[in-house]
Image: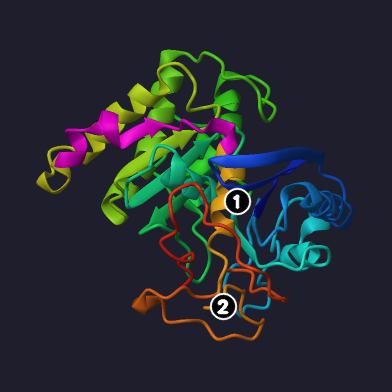
């Protein structure tokens, strides 16, 4: 049996199941201090084992940035966040204090991306990119069945973009003057319209056509870059901004204009309705993705997780490498997930 935990800025969601299509139990808890939050959720999951069976691996997603590079000093930790109590916090270690199982950690958007690849809009496709636009803006990618990260994890929301000549809004990013998140998340849209920022989880609102087109103009810079750099088979969009009436058609139109008549991407332009698609999983994607992440946990031939000091396997040979949170203790292998089978561990450089 697998467990999953999705840590947000205001709440933590957890689940138990054999995979994303077989969730046996789920619960939500408010975010308080890091220790109190992780202790409450892990103890809850541990207590459910009597009812649902032993947990053999846990997938963990969290707001970032995160330390995901194996061997790094910050591996398994939140590295930098406005939530100062969480800076440097050892997420993987906190889980293992209660649950001595392999832990696979990834970003919130990568978790959602693997869910879409496994059981959502990307099912049956080798590569998928997931883009969410709301109070924040982020994207995750899955290539060959594995979420992508290397020296660090992707921060696609901070892609530098050309500012529209008519746009004088102050960037809503504290790091960059002209990055996509600073100019295209909901706070930037509200500022242009003289409105207060929408709270997280707010229902989508209608926007003037001019505002929709400007937003699509910005977002198309990312979808165009993704097309040329990653060439995903599908880009899945989600979030309150993408749910605004007319936003997705405007994004498809703006993407087509940017790609133009380049013969190298003619197949994309000809099928944008099938290329840029809405998420069927919605707000469930990240949590469901943690159950997919759990299936990436390493196993030995005997069906147990390797020791903490086990050397990585050769991923080029197709053998799994240790997952992002190398387990401190061995655990019995659980059943195969009922969602799409794993193609290997996360790409981690």
Bin the neighbour count of mark 2 within 10 Å (Cα to Cα): few under 14, some 14-19, many 20 and up.
Answer: few
Closer to the camera, 106 or 25? Answer: 25
Q: Which label belongs to residue 244? A: none
The verdict on residue 197 being magenta is no
Magenta stretch in the rendered image: 267-284
Determine which residue is flagged by label 1: 290
128 over 164 or under it: above or below: below
Distance, label 2 to label 1, CA atoms, is 24 Å
**Residue under the image location 49 percent in, 23 percent down:** 243
Work out whether residue 8 or residue 87 is closer to the camera in this orientation and state it. 8
State left or right for residue 346 relative to residue 175. left
From the viewer's perspective, tell me whether residue 236 is left or right of residue 332.
left
Q: Is residue 87 visible?
A: yes
Q: Dividing the image into 4 quarters, which one contains the N terminus?
A: bottom right
The secondary element bearing badge 2 is classed as loop
Mark 2 or 1 closer to N-term?
Answer: 1
The location of residue 151, given as percent across then percent down, is: 50, 71
Q: In this orientation, which residue lies closer to the viewer: 159 or 35? A: 35
Quarter holding residue 214? top left
Q: Name the residue under label 2.
A: 302
Residue mark closest to the camera, 2 vs 1? 2
């Amino acid at each position: 049996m697998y467990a999953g935990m999705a840590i947000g800025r205001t709440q933590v969601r957890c689940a138990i199941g054999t995979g994303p299509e077989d969730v046996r139990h789920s619960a939500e808890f408010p975010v308080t201090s890091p220790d109190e939050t992780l202790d409450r959720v892990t103890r809850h999951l541990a207590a459910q084992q009597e009812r649902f069976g032993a947990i053999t691996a846990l997938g963990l997603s969290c707001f970032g940035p995160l330390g995901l590079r194996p061997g790094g000093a910050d591996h398994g930790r939140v590295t930098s966040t406005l939530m100062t109590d969480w800076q440097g916090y050892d997420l993987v270690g906190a889980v293992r204090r209660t649950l001595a199982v392999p832990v696979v950690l990834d970003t919130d958007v990568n978790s959602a991306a693997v869910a879409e690849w496994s059981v959502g809009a990307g099912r049956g496709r080798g590569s998928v990119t997931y883009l969410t636009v709301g109070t924040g803006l982020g994207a995750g990618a899955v290539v060959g069945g594995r979420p992508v990260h290397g020296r660090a994890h992707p921060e696609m929301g901070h892609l530098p973009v050309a500012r529209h000549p008519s746009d004088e809004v102050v960037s809503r990013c504290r790091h960059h003057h002209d990055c996509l998140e600073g100019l295209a998340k909901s706070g930037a849209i509200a500022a242009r319209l003289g409105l207060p920022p929408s709270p997280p989880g707010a229902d989508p609102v209608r926007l003037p056509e001019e505002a929709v087109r400007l937003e699509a103009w910005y977002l198309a810079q990312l979808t165009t870059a993704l097309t040329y750099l990653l060439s995903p088979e599908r880009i899945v969009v989600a979030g309150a901004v993408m749910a605004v009436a007319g936003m997705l058609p405007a994004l498809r139109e703006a993407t087509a204009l940017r790609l133009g008549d380049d013969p190298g991407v003619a197949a994309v332009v000809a099928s944008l309705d099938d290329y840029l698609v809405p998420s069927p999983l919605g707000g469930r994607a990240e949590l469901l993705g943690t159950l997919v992440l759990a299936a990436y946990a390493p196993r030995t031939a005997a069906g147990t997780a390797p020791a903490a000091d086990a050397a990585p396997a050769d991923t080029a040979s197709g053998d799994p490498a240790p997952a992002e949170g190398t387990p401190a203790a061995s655990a019995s292998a659980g059943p195969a997930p009922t969602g799409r089978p794993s193609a290997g561990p996360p790409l981690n450089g």
